[in-house]
Image (cartoon, helix red, strand yellow):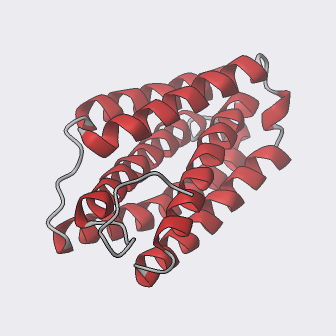
Amino acid sequence: MSNRPHSPGGQPDKKRVSEMLRVDHAGEYAAVAIYKAQQRVFARSPKKQKIATQLQHMQDEEQKHLDAFDELLLETDTRPTALMPIWDFASKSLGIATALMGEKAAHACTEAVETVIEEHYAEQIEETKDSHPELSAKFTEFREDELAHRDVAVEEGAKQAVGYPLLSAVIKAGCRTAIKLSEKI
């Protein structure tokens, strides 16, 4: 069970819902930036069109998530994270770096990021399922997309990337840190 702040009735309070929306907005923004950077690297080579197309599809789905969180931030009068310029730079850099390392490294990046994000959504689904069923449904829908992205990455050889254990661990740690910071800042 979550030790997050709740109202006296046991429901996540407005502050907690704002934290969820803020961090999810930042995460979806970062996902779009990562995929866009990777896709641009791979799209330059005719031999890399399969992965470029996969990344474009994932980017398009993440953009839909980002658009939904843009709307939710406005509807709930929630500010985005002040760390967005840092996440923008970090996400683009991660996307470019992993793409330059090759297809398997790009897929390892997807697998690591999407694993952390789907776990994060699962926690939010549990926390909001009774008190905010519409929000919980949105989290569930987006979690399914993240799981599909992760599965594609694994099928395409993410775990065969050179240095996979270290690469995955570093990316996952970065994602978890970004989540914690984006909730508050």
| Screen quadrant of the C terminus | top left
Quarter of image, res 145: bottom right
Indicate the position of residue 81 as horizontal and vertical percent values: 24, 44
Quarter of image, res 69: bottom left
Q: Does residue 167 appear left or right of residue 177 in this picture?
A: right
Q: Does residue 55 appear left or right of residue 133 in this picture?
A: right
Indicate the position of residue 116 as horizontal and vertical percent values: 60, 44
Q: Residue at x 76, y 16 (%)?
A: 163
Location of residue 143 with respect to 164 vertically, above or below: below
| Residue situated in front as seen by the camera: 13 or 86 | 13
Q: Residue at x 69, y 42 (%)?
A: 111
Indicate the position of residue 104 as horizontal and vertical percent values: 76, 32
Location of residue 184 with respect to 150 vertically, above or below: above
| Residue situated in front as seen by the camera: 142 or 92 | 142
Q: Residue at x 56, y 35 (%)?
A: 44
Location of residue 20 with respect to 144 vertically, above or below: above
Count of labels shown?
0
| Screen quadrant of the N terminus | bottom right
